Image (spheres, rainbow, N blue to C red):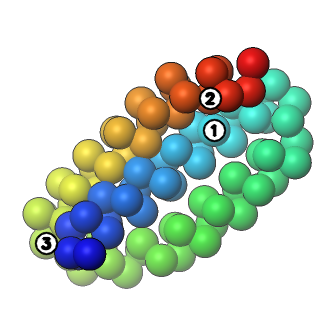
């Protein structure tokens, strides 16, 4: 897997988990919120170094991955959990 795609997928997962965590908390799904929080922390640790020393190309992939992750969680979570 190339580096840009890997960065995109990690950003996608971080934002997906972050927005999911907020939804879980607001709907009182405590265990899911805790699991999402652990996933966010793990992925954040993996991303910090790569993005801080990366070039703008990698940063753009990261930003777009976050955008797609947020959009996916907005449409996917209500279908799965309601």
> Which numbered mark, 3 or 2, is in the foreground of this view?
2
Q: In this view, does 58 lie to the left or right of 8?
A: left
- The image shows residue 20, relative to residue 15, as above or below, that is above
Find out whether the residues at labels 3 and 2 contact each other: C-beta distance under 8 Å.
Answer: no
- The image shows residue 9, relative to residue 79, as above or below, that is below
Find out whether the residues at labels 2 and 1 contact each other: C-beta distance under 8 Å.
Answer: yes
**Image location of residue 17, percent across then percent down:** 59, 48
Q: Earlier along the polypeptide chain: callout 2 or callout 1?
A: 1
Q: Earlier along the polypeptide chain: callout 1 or callout 3?
A: 1
**Label 2, residues with CA under 10 Å away: few <14, some 14-19, many ≥20:** some
Residue behind mark 2: 77
Residue behind mark 3: 55
Q: Quadrant of residue 7?
A: bottom left
Which quadrant does the C terminus fall into?
Answer: top right
* Gap in angstroms between the C-alphas marked 3 and 2: 33 Å
**Image location of residue 55, percent across then percent down:** 13, 72
The residue shown at (75%, 34%) is: 24
> Which numbered mark, 1 or 3, is in the foreground of this view?
1
Tag 1's secondary structure? helix
**Image location of residue 35, percent across then percent down:** 76, 56
- The image shows residue 37, relative to residue 16, as above or below, that is below
Q: Quadrant of residue 80?
A: top right
Tag 2's secondary structure? helix
Please tell me which residue lies in front, 31 or 48: 31
Checking the image for residue 42, the label placed there is: none
Q: Earlier along the polypeptide chain: callout 3 or callout 2?
A: 3
């Amino acid at each position: 897997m190339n580096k840009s795609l890997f960065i995109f997928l990690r950003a996608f997962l971080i934002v997906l988990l972050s927005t999911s965590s907020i939804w879980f908390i607001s709907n009182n799904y405590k265990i899911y919120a805790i699991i999402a929080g652990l996933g966010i922390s793990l992925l954040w640790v993996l991303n910090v170094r790569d993005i801080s020393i990366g070039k703008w190309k990698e940063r753009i992939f990261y930003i777009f991955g976050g955008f797609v992750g947020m959009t996916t969680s907005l449409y996917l979570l209500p279908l799965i959990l309601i």
